[in-house]
């Protein structure tokens, strides 16, 4: 089976609806594996479990990259129990800010420390906190530092840079969405999910064209999204 690292999860926020996706990131073709609505009352743990179930039915998963809002110890425990590695930025609390200030005084660029996170009922999740200074930080105080949590000693930390593909992908997905003024949740989610499908098809076709024309694949698309949309409208009338 192909080994693909995925980033789970970044909710796609809309004024009316909430959606979440799971997407391949350091795979040659950054495709969306699944999209789902975020239902009222659902926990982040439930959302992550659901999307991981979908992803693991399709590909072999090694590493999970997440956004800061998913730094819950219960989410991290679920991922670890599956035998997966994770990287997630941590929201800075008082202790993290204090540590970042100490690192700044010592002029240290990186620091790691183990941390136990309470799960309840005298159960704990063990993780590693990794402090890293951003060379291009806009601030000159402790905010130069970012804090990440990982259960793999930080070896996958550099891969967190792949998260830009997710944000870039969401911008492209919007271009594939049909315009609607409807307030119907089901219809709006269908438009979003269909746009995810079209986006993934576009990236897959682009990869085939690149390999066919140049013999290799670059992450920057050769086939323009507008060309794909024009062809889609011509062949199906959709668009």
Image (cartoon, grey):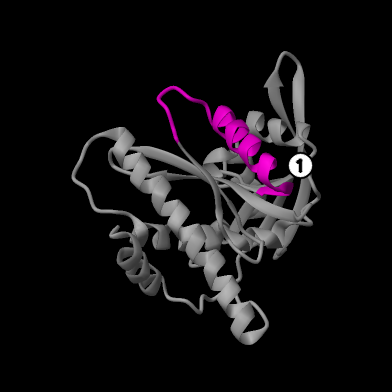
Which residue is the extreme one toward the left?
181
Farthest bottom residue in view: 214
**On-image quarter of the C terminus:** bottom left
Q: Return the x and y of residue 225 as percentages of the image width and height.
A: 40, 70
Range covered by the magenta-colored residues: 37-64
Which residue is situated farthest in the front direction here? 235
- For the question of whether residue 167 can be seen, the reply is no
Front residue of this view, candidates 18 and 195: 195
- Pick whichever, 226 or 166, lies toward us: 226
Neighbour class for label 1 at 10 Å: few (<14), some, many (≥20)? some
User: On the picture, is 187 further left or further right than 68?
Assistant: left
Q: Quadrant of residue 102?
A: bottom right
> Which residue is pictured at 54% across the width and 63% down the height?
165
> x, y percentage for residue 137?
53, 67
Name the residue tied to disc 1: 84
Judge from the rendering whether residue 165 lies leftward or rightward of residue 41; answer left or right.
right
**In the image: residue 32, left or right of residue 81:** left
The residue shown at (40%, 25%) is 40
| Residue 26 to residue 60: above or below | below
Looking at the picture, tell me which residue is in the foreground, 69 or 36.
Answer: 36
- Residue 114 location, x and y as percent? 79, 41
Give me the residue at 42% from left, 40% from top: 19
| SS label for mark 1 | loop
Q: Is residue 114 above or below residue 174?
A: above
Residue drawn at x 72%, y 13% is 121
Q: Toward which corner of the image does residue 90 lie, by quadrant?
A: top right
Magenta region includes residue 157: no
Comparing 118 with 68, the one in front is 68
Is residue 14 in sight in this rendering? yes
Check residue 51 for magenta coloring.
yes
Place of residue 91 in the rendered image (x, y in percent of width and height, measured from the top left): 56, 43
């Amino acid at each position: 089976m192909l080994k693909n690292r995925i980033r789970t999860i970044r909710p796609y926020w809309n004024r009316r609806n909430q959606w979440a996706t799971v997407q391949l990131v350091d795979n040659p073709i950054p495709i969306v594996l699944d999209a789902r609505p975020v239902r009222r009352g659902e926990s982040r743990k439930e959302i992550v479990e659901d999307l991981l179930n979908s992803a693991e039915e399709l590909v072999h998963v090694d590493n999970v990259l997440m956004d800061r809002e998913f730094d819950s110890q219960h989410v991290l425990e679920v991922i670890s129990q599956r035998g997966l590695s994770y990287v997630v930025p941590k929201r800075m609390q008082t202790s993290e800010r204090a540590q970042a200030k100490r690192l700044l005084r010592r002029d240290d660029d990186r620091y790691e420390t183990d941390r136990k996170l309470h799960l309840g009922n005298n159960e704990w999740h063990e993780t590693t906190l990794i402090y890293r200074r951003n060379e291009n930080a806009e601030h000159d105080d402790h905010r130069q530092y970012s804090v990440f949590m990982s259960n793999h000693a930080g070896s996958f930390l550099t891969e967190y840079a792949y998260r830009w593909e997710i944000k870039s992908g969401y911008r492209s997905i919007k271009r594939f969405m049909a315009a609607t003024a409807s307030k119907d949740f089901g219809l709006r989610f269908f438009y979003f999910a269909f746009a995810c499908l079209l986006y993934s098809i576009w990236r897959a076709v682009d990869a085939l064209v690149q390999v066919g024309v140049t013999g290799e694949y670059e992450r920057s698309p050769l086939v323009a999204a507008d060309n794909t949309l024009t062809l889609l409208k011509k062949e199906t009338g959709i668009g």
